[in-house]
Amino acid sequence: MENKLQLLRQHFEEIVSLTDEEWNFVQSHFEFKSLKKHQFLIQVGQPVDFEYWIIKGLVKAYSIDEKGKEHILQFAMENYWVSDHCAFQHQEPGTIFVDCLEDSEFFCLSLENREKICIEVPAVANFFRIKSNHGYINLQQRILSLLTMTAESRYEYLLNKLPTLIQRVPKKLIASYLGVSRETLSRFNS
Amino acid sequence: MENKLQLLRQHFEEIVSLTDEEWNFVQSHFEFKSLKKHQFLIQVGQPVDFEYWIIKGLVKAYSIDEKGKEHILQFAMENYWVSDHCAFQHQEPGTIFVDCLEDSEFFCLSLENREKICIEVPAVANFFRIKSNHGYINLQQRILSLLTMTAESRYEYLLNKLPTLIQRVPKKLIASYLGVSRETLSRFNS
DNA sequence: ATGGAAAAGTGATTTAGGTCACTTTTAGCT
DNA sequence: AGCTAAAAGTGACCTAAATCACTTTTCCAT
């Protein structure tokens, strides 16, 4: 566990500096969790008690429309944060599903604990502020890609940006992430 | 100017509390700016020195694709923050345009000043963290709407969510925001 | 009030991508 | 190794929405 916490500390220290004392305080507010492939981290209608930092593994965050079709909001793997941020922030029942595509391990942070460490350790508030900002920028890029690019170039773009992801994830899920049908995706780069 | 700064203070205090002393420190880090309709706040290739809080007015943030087509990332009006967040954060040349759809007024915050007030006044860091989080949640909603909804229901959704915006903005810009052609939009609700 | 430009509407045609139905390939089990 | 189920590929057809070309309406600025 020590070395896993060490990874999390490194993740924080990529952006802000923490004293040993601060870090001890911060780390004590995380819980460890481990899930097998296919298990759920978050489910629609269930409380969303945590936001999760992924130690190892891979998850997908998605919603299901009226027709039962799955739409992938995000893939998240090592070093990523994942949650139903909306439900978490407002402490409401989940609006999306998050489940494991691989056996995965997480550090879990409750809203209460997040606010506590943000107020106690200003560097942590700055960490989350900057992280959140990065996330915002990424989503803006994705919106732009949905508005401006064809399905095929979005696929090429993703191949370039996250080549490892394509290895780890079935193509039909990539299709769902890109907003394109499985069949259409299969006809690309052929 | 006093009452305009007062509006900004109220905006902060919707989320965090500030003492008079803190507020005096914070407000001194903003600059005022006023622009007429059609003037640019941010341009592609130009430095992005500020992020802007809109006192009054309306702007659009957009990018232009290879074919010269405009894609609207965001409309922003009173009480909204707007910038090329990506370029601003990394202090790189702008990647989008932001221009005024109406005569507008702004309070401008430089990156240096933002970091300064965030470090000096932890409540401000928390304010931006929470704001950024809200922004993230909004973008996630928009991505979901682009993935799951038809152009027509996206339009209906927007009509519901921001009825005032439709009044203030030509339909062709709404079309560009929704990722639909002007002609197709015009054939809806008819 | 009036002329010109921007915005909005509309018909005809095209096209990217969806859907359905089926086959082939690959990946996990026991 | 062998069986099953999930994933991927493919052909035929369909549809939402793009594009193009043109008309009508609305909005300003003089």
Image (tube, coloured by chain):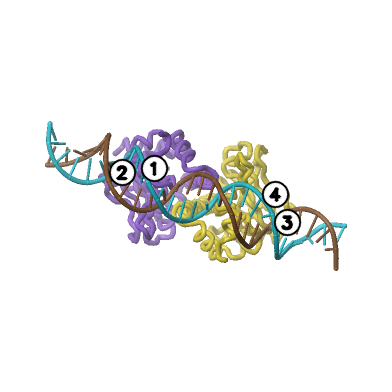
Chain colours: A purple, B yellow, C brown, D cyan
On whether disc 3 and disc 1 are found on a single subunit, the reply is: no
Picture quadrant of residue B42: top right
Q: Please name the residue that numbered disc 2 is placed on.
A: A101
Q: Mark 1 highlights which residue?
A: A174
Which callout, 3 or 1, points to the residue nearer the camera?
Answer: 1
Quadrant of the rendering where the N terminus of chain A is positioned: top left
Q: Amino acid at mark 4?
A: Glu
Residues at marks 2 and 3 on the same chain? no
Residue B123 appears in the picture as rendered: no
Image coordinates of residue B148 in percent, x first then y, are 44, 55
Label 3–label 1 contact, CB within 8 A: no
Q: Is residue B114 visible?
A: yes
Q: Residue tagged by mark 4? A: B31
Q: Secondary structure at mark 4?
A: strand
| Residue B76 - label | none
Parent chain of label 2: A
Residue A143: image location, x then y, percent: 51, 47
User: How far, Cα to Cα, is label 2 from label 3?
Assistant: 50 Å
SS at mark 2? loop
What is the CA distance from the residue labelled 2 to the residue labelled 4?
Answer: 49 Å
The front one of A149 and A71 is: A149
Quarter placement of the C terminus of chain A = top left
Q: Depth-wise, is mark 2 or mark 4 nearer the camera?
A: 2
The circle on residue B103 is 3
Instruction: Identify which amino acid the numbered label 3 is placed on.
Output: Asp
Q: Chain of mark 3?
A: B
